[in-house]
C-alpha cells in the first residue's frame, strides 16, 4: 500500500490543530524552519528532528522580510512539490507552507530584533536581514509551539542570534544546531550554490579552504587578524570578486578574538560572480 501523502497546511489555525492533536496523543514536537529549495543540509535538520521527536513539522516560507533591496528574493529557487517529497522521505509528519498574507496580514506592524549580536558580520553587510529572520522565526516558534527547533550551523550567526532570542524572550523551545553538510570538495551546501556557473562552482571550495587555513593557523598561534588577512587574500586569488568579512569570533557572543582563549569560530562571506556565499568553521581547540 502506498504511504499516505504528507499533509500540507497553509494556515496557522490548521497547523495548531495538528500540533494540539499530537500533543494530546503524548508526542513531542520538532520544528524545522526552511525557505524550501531543500538540499542534504536541510534534510539533516529533518533527520535530527525525526530522531528526537515523536512528530516533526517542517516549514517552507520564503520570507520577504529577510531580503534587502537588490538581494535575490525574486530569483530564490522555489520548488514546493520536490521539497515536500524529500521531507516525506525523511520522516516529516506535516508541512506548513503559508502565504505571505498568512504570515504578514494587512496591518502587521511588530518586529523582533536582537541588539548587539546582529550589528556585525552578516548584520553589518545586510541591514535589516536579522530583524526579518528573528521576526519570522519568533512567529514560527509561537505558531508551532514545538519542543525543539532545528537550524544549521552553516548560518552560524543566525543560530547564535536565534538561540539568544529564544532565551531572552523565554520562548519555551530548545534551539538545536546541526553541523554543516558539505560537498566532497568542502563547499558548504546552500540553496544559493545553484546560482553558480560551472566555472564559479570550481572556484567556490576556496572559501572553505581559506577558512580552514585561517582556523588552523590561529590554533597554531598566529594572531587571528594576520591569519584572516592571509586567508582572505588566498580566497581573492582563487577567483572570488570580494570578501565581505573573514573574522575569528567567540562562538557564543561573536565578539572578535585575536588570540582565542575560549571556543571560537572563523566566519566569512564572499562574493563569486553574482552569488554571495557564507561559511564558517570551528577553530580547533588546543
Ligand atoms: O535559514 C533559513 O533558511 C531562514 O533564515 C529561516 C531560518 C528559515 C527563516 O526564514
Image (cartoon, rainbow, N blue to C red):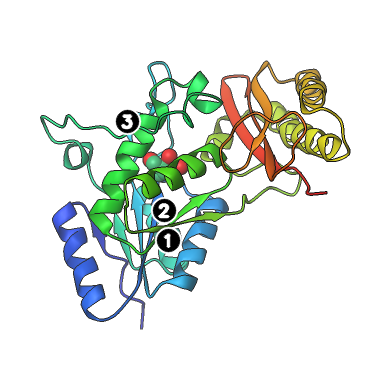
Task: Name the spot of residue 198 as percent of width and height, x first.
Answer: 68, 31
Residue at numbered disc 1: 87
Q: Is residue 133 visible?
A: yes
Residue at numbered disc 3: 64
The quadrant where residue 87 appears = bottom left
What residue is at 60 percent from the left and 32 percent from the top? Answer: 278
Secondary structure beneath dot 3 equals helix
Residue 264 or residue 278, whichever sits in front: 264
The answer for how far apart the CA atoms under marks 1 and 3 are is 23 Å
| Image quadrant, ligand 1 | top left
The answer for how far apart the CA atoms under marks 1 and 2 are is 6 Å
Task: Name the spot of residue 209 as percent of width and height, x first.
Answer: 79, 36
Residue at numbered disc 2: 83
Check disc 3: other Cα within 10 Å, few if <14, some if 14-19, many if 20+.
some
Secondary structure beneath dot 1 equals helix
Q: Nearer the viewer, mark 3 or mark 2?
A: 3
The quadrant where residue 86 appears = bottom left
Counting residues from the start of the chain, the first of labels 1 and 3 encountered is 3
Q: Is residue 79 visible?
A: no
Amino acid at each position: 500500500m502506498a504511504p499516505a501523502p504528507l499533509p500540507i497546511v497553509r494556515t496557522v489555525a490548521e497547523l495548531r490543530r495538528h500540533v494540539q492533536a499530537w500533543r494530546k496523543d503524548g508526542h513531542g514536537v520538532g520544528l524545522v524552519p526552511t525557505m524550501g529549495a531543500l538540499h542534504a543540509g536541510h534534510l539533516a535538520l529533518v533527520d535530527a528532528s525525526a530522531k528526537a521527536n515523536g512528530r516533526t513539522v517542517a516549514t517552507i516560507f520564503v520570507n520577504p522580510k529577510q531580503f534587502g533591496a537588490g538581494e535575490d528574493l525574486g530569483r530564490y529557487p522555489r520548488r514546493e512539490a520536490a521539497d515536500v517529497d524529500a521531507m516525506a522521505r525523511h520522516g516529516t509528519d506535516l508541512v506548513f507552507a503559508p502565504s505571505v498574507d498568512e504570515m504578514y496580514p494587512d496591518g502587521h506592524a511588530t518586529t523582533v530584533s536582537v541588539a548587539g549580536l546582529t550589528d556585525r558580520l552578516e548584520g553589518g553587510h545586510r541591514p535589516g536581514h536579522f530583524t526579518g529572520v528573528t521576526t519570522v522565526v519568533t512567529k514560527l516558534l509561537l505558531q508551532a509551539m514545538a519542543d525543539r527547533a532545528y537550524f544549521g550551523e552553516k548560518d552560524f550567526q543566525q543560530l547564535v542570534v536565534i538561540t539568544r532570542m529564544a532565551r531572552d524572550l523565554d520562548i519555551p523551545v530548545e534551539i538545536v544546531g546541526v553541523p554543516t553538510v558539505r560537498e566532497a570538495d568542502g563547499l558548504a551546501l546552500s540553496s544559493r550554490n545553484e546560482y553558480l556557473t560551472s566555472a564559479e562552482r570550481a572556484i567556490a571550495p576556496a572559501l572553505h579552504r581559506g577558512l580552514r587555513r585561517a582556523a588552523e593557523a590561529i590554533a597554531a598561534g598566529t594572531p587571528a587578524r594576520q591569519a584572516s588577512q592571509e586567508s582572505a587574500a588566498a580566497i581573492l586569488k582563487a577567483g572570488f570578486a570580494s570578501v565581505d568579512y573573514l573574522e575569528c569570533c567567540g562562538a557564543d557572543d561573536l565578539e572578535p578574538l585575536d588570540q582565542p582563549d575560549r571556543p571560537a569560530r572563523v566566519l566569512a562571506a564572499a562574493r563569486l560572480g553574482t552569488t554571495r556565499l557564507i561559511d564558517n568553521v570551528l577553530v580547533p581547540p588546543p
